[in-house]
Image (spheres, rainbow, N blue to C red):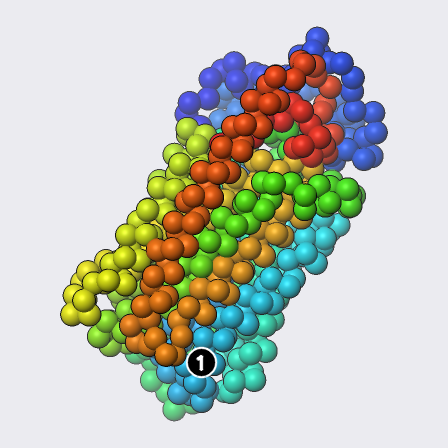
Amino acid sequence: MSDPSMKEKDVEASIRGPSPDLAVGEVKDVRNADAALAFLRHEGTVREMTPQDHKKLVRKIDLMIMPIMWGCYFFQYLDKTLINYANVMGLQEDAHITKAQFSNLALIFYVSYLAFEFPHGYGMQRLPTAKYLGAMVFFWGTIVASTSACKNWGALVTTRVLLGVFESAVAPSLILITGMWYKANEQPLRTGIWYLGTGTGTVVGSLISYGFQHYKSSTFTSWQIMFLVVGLMTCCHGLVVMLILPDNPMKSRLTHDEKVWAIERLRENQTGIENKHFKPAQVFECLTDPQTWMLCLITIASNVPNGAVSSFQATLIKGFGYDSKTTALLQIPSGFISIIAILIATYLAGRFSQRAWNLIALLVPGIMGGCLLAFLPDENKIGKLIGNYLTNCIGATLPLLYSWVSSNIAGHSKKVTMNALLLMSFCIGNIIGPLTFTAESAPEYVPAKISIVVTCTVAAVLTIALRMYYVWENKRRDALPDGHKADVEFSDLTDRKNKEFRYRL
């Protein structure tokens, strides 16, 4: 997965770092700086990294962490949407709950997800990131397996609350890990690869649902067996994360030279790798930074339709007149569309360093899909089905937002705070989305479909505004006097304090 466009001089620069001739000072307080700086100052010099070394290193990093990260997001998405498949497999009837109560289950999950973002952010900064992530994966796997024993409303509410608590650690952890290992131009595609867990989760979930609907037993229902099997698989992956995924490059299985190369090549990011000291000043800066709230509003607006689609896709398709088994199969193309959209958008964003335009390009099919769902006549089932499929492009905006935050927010305490706010915004959008599906508007749900069109349009306008802000800020910094502080890249300065930092568009 190494970038084929990387030139030899770029590789050499990434290991040499900034020229000492430009230095006007240096970072002296190593304890308060990034952990990578202390590592580099104690490790001495290593041989120069060649272009061949660079390709081999990136490939080794990819193989070491990407499959595990993908697995985390795959199980996170599959496990939270199992309730969607269980609903068409008879969950409502078996648990004796109403349509309104089922809708509230999606809401409850995101409320607890939202509430625990800040605690997880603090935990990820203070504790080993990979071990923390693995523990959360294992815990939510036990909750998914326990859902197989739920037979009433109270039990389902309890499991959904706990599922939201533990799953809320996944995305911010993966964003941090991606930033620890990859250069800014590599991050969109890598984020897209682990985010493919959503598309593959949709495909696998649909096939699992279809398969388990053929299971017949007087003891257990098909949806109970589904929750039990998938929950146990998730627990196994949690153990894999704790045992195999490294906490950072300094503690990885790379050779000594490779560890130094892995750190040095990230100098140009200016975002550091890790700092275990919580800094309230960086939290305050995050809360007063204009980009913070623009990113949050874009995330909310783009996730209102995403929340609606992920929670009610099976319900929508079944409402077109298909039976339960056909509905499960008809959800499979949604997963493939999501996969294609994610891969194309994240590749182009990294290749041309243009996140904003790719994000807008994903919102356009969402607007078109919402229009088809809302305004086509009921008898045009094929047209409505196509509209439903187009809305699956909207979810691909999230990895672009993740990579935007990873590459444009510096200072470790600021990063974990921004990650928490981003995921809280994700939750708010996903809370609002299902609420647009009201019992009064069933089975057409026209207000919900119109909301897809409106919120996608709002997200596109806000994205343009954010890009204009970044362009203005970069030009303002370009006009400042030149000067370089040695090792500023690993000083744990925020993007606003470090005047050498430039925002990625």
> What is the crowding at mark 1: few (fewer than 14 residues within 10 Å), some, or many (at least 20)?
few
- Residue 136, image x and y in percent? 62, 61
Q: Residue furthest bottom?
A: 218
> In the shown orientation, is residue 101 left or right of residue 389?
right
- Residue 451, image x and y in percent? 38, 61
* Residue 339 makes an appearance in the image: no
In the picture, the quarter occupied by the N terminus is top left
Q: Nearer the viewer, residue 505 or 490?
A: 505
Q: Nearer the viewer, residue 191 or 237?
A: 191
Q: Nearer the viewer, residue 185 or 288?
A: 288
Which residue is found at the position 54% from the left and 60% from the top? 427
**Please, is residue 420 above or below residue 451 in the view?**
above
Which residue is found at the position 70% from the left and 58% from the top? 119
> In the shown orientation, is residue 180 left or right of residue 486?
left
**Please, is residue 227 above or below residue 353 in the view?**
below
Q: Residue furthest left?
A: 379
Which residue is found at the position 44% from the left and 52% from the top? 302
Circle 1: residue type = Ala
* Residue 459 makes an appearance in the image: yes
- Residue 157, image x and y in percent? 55, 78
**Please, is residue 35 above or below residue 163 in the view?**
above
**Please, is residue 147 above or below residue 288 in the view?**
below
- Residue 100, image x and y in percent? 44, 80
Task: Tell how many labels.
Answer: 1
Q: Which residue is mark 1?
A: 100
Which residue is found at the position 59% from the left and 72% from the top? 161
**Secondary structure of the residue carrying numbered label 1:** helix
Q: Residue furthest top?
A: 21
